[in-house]
Image (cartoon, helix red, strand yellow):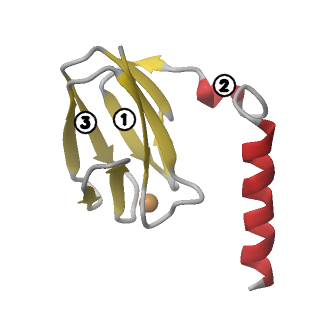
Amino acid sequence: MSRSFVLGVLAAATVALGAGCGSSADAAPVATTQVTMAKSYRFDPKTIEVKAGSTVTWTNDDNFTHTVHVDGREDHKVEPGERVSIAFDTPGTYRYVCTLHRRDMKGEVIVR
Ligand SMILES: [Cu+2]
């Protein structure tokens, strides 16, 4: 209970700092349609940029089951060694999470 409280406070502090602070290397968008769920509990690269109409593929190279849940869309479970592809037709910024590891696994797809 106290541990999760501390983590919650840290998460809030991270949000308060805003974009561009801290792990700014992760935040720079990478032009790719391929995202790896790398060991351990990460989306790599975390922020990607694609053209409208692109299909993005997430591949699970970790030893654990993860999911890809884009805001407003369905959750996709991805077992180790498997992949899921999602089409992005409309420009915008789409946040997504792994619903099993929300604190650690978040990413963003920027559609131009
Ligand atoms: Cu996960």
Proximity of marks 1 and 3: CB atoms separated by less than 8 Å: yes
Q: Which residue is mark 3?
A: 57
| Left or right of 13, for residue 104 | left
| Left or right of 98, for residue 68 | left
Q: Residues within 10 Å of mark 2 (few under 14, many from 20)?
A: few
The quadrant of the rendering that contains the C terminus is top left
Which disc number belongs to residue 8? none
Q: Position of residue 50 (x, y in %)?
A: 33, 18
Label 2 secondary element: helix
Disc with the residue nearer the chain's start (1 vs 2):
2
Label 1 secondary element: strand
Q: Could you say which quadrant of the image residue 51 lies in?
A: top left
Seen at 61% across and 28% down, the residue is 27
Proximity of marks 1 and 2: CB atoms separated by less than 8 Å: no
Instruction: Indicate the amino acid at tag 2.
Output: Ala
Label 3 secondary element: strand
Proximity of marks 3 and 2: CB atoms separated by less than 8 Å: no
Q: Is residue 52 above or below residue 20?
A: above
Instruction: Indicate the amino acid at tag 3.
Output: Thr
The quadrant of the rendering that contains the N terminus is bottom right
| Left or right of 12, for residue 65 | left
Q: Position of residue 47 (x, y in %)?
A: 49, 29
Q: Which residue is mark 2?
A: 25
Q: Position of residue 31 (x, y in %)?
A: 40, 15
Seen at 44% across and 67% down, the residue is 100
| Left or right of 107, for residue 103 | right
Q: Position of residue 48 (x, y in %)?
A: 43, 25
Which disc number belongs to residue 35? 1
Whether the residue carrying mark 3 lies under 8 Å from ligand 1 is answered with no
Task: For marks 3 and 2, give the CA distance.
Answer: 22 Å
Task: For marks 1 and 2, give the CA distance.
Answer: 16 Å
**Residue 101 or residue 87, whichever sits in front:** 87
